[in-house]
Amino acid sequence: MVFRVGYLILICALTFEVARSDGADGTSATPATLPAASQPSSIVKPFMDEHDFSKCYQTVLEWERVGRTKKADILKELSEQVTSGEIIELIKLEDNFIVPRPNANHFQGHGSIVRQDVFIRGGKAAWAIEQLLNIQLHPITEKMTKEELEGAVREAQNCVASYRRGLEDSKTIEK
């Protein structure tokens, strides 16, 4: 188990370095746009459509308690939503500090610090992936260039793929 978690962390760290170096020469100032995300499945759709952030948080807590195979399916669906730049309205962000949106905060000092821009669908999906895998991904924000967004999406998808490979490897070992 420790080896698989270490492998996942290593893959995510290496992917982040690749994602961070994409467009590092500063030549791109193109706003981020990627093809539209696929429609979420019935498992992830209620979460992606929810506007109450406190309910989103509760959903992620419930997902943390599901079996590994179902969690892998949820993560796969979330990784497909990371590409979406659709702006969403969120309410009930009480005492959460949303780093990319400092004017939207009512931080009282004892809530969560959210590095992802949860006001866009891709950022909300990336936040859920971070919570489920207990990792930090490159923040997905509205102001990213296309190259930065592609790198961040690749990082999130690689971390999810690593989790799924680890799950498959553990099934092979158990046989």
Image (cartoon, rainbow, N blue to C red):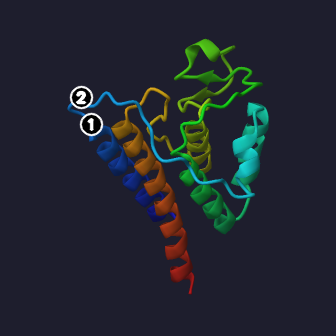
Mark 2 sits on what residue? 26
Quarter containing the C terminus = bottom right
- Residue drawn 30% across and 46% down? 18
**Left or right: where does residue 25 sit relative to residue 54?**
left
Callout 1: helix, strand or loop? loop
Can you say whether 37 is above or below 26 in the image? below
Q: Give the x, y percent position of residue 92.
A: 77, 25
Callout 2: helix, strand or loop? loop
The answer to whether residue 106 is seen in the rendering is: yes
Which of these two is toward me, 67 or 78?
78
The three-letter amino acid code for the residue at tag 2 is Gly
* 10 Å crowding of disc 1: few (<14), some (14-19), many (20+): some
Q: Quadrant of residue 147?
A: top left
Q: Give the x, y percent position of residue 96.
A: 66, 23
**Left or right: where does residue 38 sit relative to residue 156?**
right
Which of these two is toward me, 166 or 56?
56
Calculate the distance from the C-alpha at mark 1 to the C-alpha at mark 2: 6 Å
- Residue drawn 58% across and 59% down? 76
The three-letter amino acid code for the residue at tag 1 is Gly
Q: Quadrant of residue 66?
A: bottom right
Can you say whether 117 is above or below 69 in the image? above
* 10 Å crowding of disc 2: few (<14), some (14-19), many (20+): few
Mark 1 sits on what residue? 23
Q: Are marks 1 and 2 in contact (CB under 8 Å)?
A: yes
Can you say whether 43 is above or below 56 in the image? below
Q: Give the x, y percent position of residue 120.
A: 59, 33
